[in-house]
Image: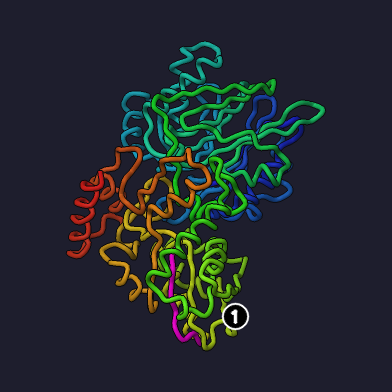
Amino acid sequence: MCGILGVVATTPVNQLLYDGLMVLQHRGQDAAGIVTVEDDAFHMHKGSGLVRDVFRTRNMRALPGNMGIAHCRYPTAGSAFDAALSQPFYVNSPFGIVLGHNGNLTNSEQLKQEMFLQDLRHINTGSDSEVLLNTLAHELQTTANGCQLDLDTIFAAVSAVHRRCRGAYAVVAMIAGHGMLAFRDPFGIRPLIFGTNETPEGTEYLFASESVALDTLGFQVLRDVAPGEAVFIDLEHRLHQRQCATNAALSPCIFEFVYLARPDSVIDGVSVYEARLRMGEHLADKLIKHIPVEQIDVVIPIPDSSRPSAMQLAQRIGVPYREGFVKNRYIGRTFIMPGQATRARSVRQKLNTVAQEFRGKRVLLVDDSIVRGTTSREIVEMARAAGALKVYFASASPPVRYPNVYGIDMPTRGELIATGRTGEEIGVEIGADALVYQDLEALKASVRDLRPALCHFDTSCFDGSYVTGDVSPEYLMAIEMAREGHRTTTKEERRASRQLQLNLMSAG
């Protein structure tokens, strides 16, 4: 999960890109970067930390030009920050290209070998985004065959990228002397939307990970980039679009609607806020089958993503909704903080209880999801410490039982509390008196109800079904070993690995 932006304007874009990154900050707190172009020369500044910390006035002044791209990074492998991994990435051959990528390639190691042995290109980092950039550069060079780029050449290169690359990728790129290119993988796993702003000097274009960036920057939404589609804006601000993939089929990551996206965004024609309201309705229908409503005095959300679901659930079951936690806005999102110990410490710094809402009450806590369980366990303890008589817990999404390989930081079994546990056992593990999970079909219905034509989703972290069709148990073991530093696995982990392989084979 990262945030990407691309702007083609009639005036300098540095402030637009900065403001857009601030709006998309929730998609990545690890690093940020901006590249602009003026007179076919790229100007870049990037670094670690929040957007506000990376850019100073002197940095903004050094980013001239009316076209540019920006990126805020979230580490998909959960590793410590490496400055070399901040984006956008740049390659000088051919033509000069910069690229920002949201997602994760599942065949990056294979592509690295092809780069070295066939394409004769050197990869400087361990980032799959650099691999994607070099794949695009190589295909542009091959299709151009030494000639000047034209539209057919550019779109043919994107088609070749689709044939070679597997996984999730929403991309914005600039080709020096030619224009801006945006494209999305054939499944549309990660979001990408674009819009326009009409000015006296001409039409301006903005590409972004979420529609909220267009709203706040004053652009009118045109539409989402379709799965497999490429959109190109030339230097005369003319828009060109072409489907570049065969058998493209929209299967967006459903976790975007559960947690990742801002509630005021619209993704693939679906309001994230309305989807979360529907999640609350479906969750309420299941809750009343497991917990007598008369045993619940108050419904309290875990801020912020779960608020719409909790409000709708409370209304549906006729129980008062209250805000019982106050959030410190200056602490990062614990889900995307590397390290279990760091997350556990952050929960107490991030949330504090309003004791009056807990004291002497039977409380239902509602969260969007339970991934590692660290936050849930700490929050249940905080509720009891504040005087709650009973603490029930409800998750607006199903148990997260499988690794996500498309750009979300949950790649190993050991970090998933649902691995090898039933719902009841998870409830005991987090210290709740009872735990209710959303059903997967109900979760899908929450989104599909708002756009019936949206039939397929990537739900791999819930059911182990990976839409790209290339994720094997061996692949999952490889990324787990890479993350764990090739440490020796325990007997329990080996048993869990064998069970995971069996589950994946039965799911696939």
* Above-or-below relation of 141 to 36: above
Q: Position of residue 265 (x, y in %)?
A: 60, 48
Q: Position of residue 102 (x, y in %)?
A: 49, 42
| Res 7 visible | no
Q: Quadrant of residue 484?
A: bottom left
| Res 288 visible | yes
Q: Position of residue 60 (x, y in %)?
A: 71, 44
- Please name whichever residue, 464 or 110, is drawn nearer the observer in this view of the structure: 464
* Amino acid tagged 1: Val
Residue 388, magenta (yes or no): yes
Q: Quadrant of residue 17?
A: top right
Instruction: Say what secondary structure mark 1 lies in.
Output: loop
Colour scheme used in the picture? rainbow
* Above-or-below relation of 487 to 154: below
Q: Identify which residue is drawn at 20% across, 56% down.
A: 499
Span of residues in magenta: 387-395
Q: Identify which residue is drawn at 35% across, 32% down.
A: 111
Which residue was labeled with disc 1?
354
Q: Identify which residue is drawn at 46% across, 23% down.
A: 244
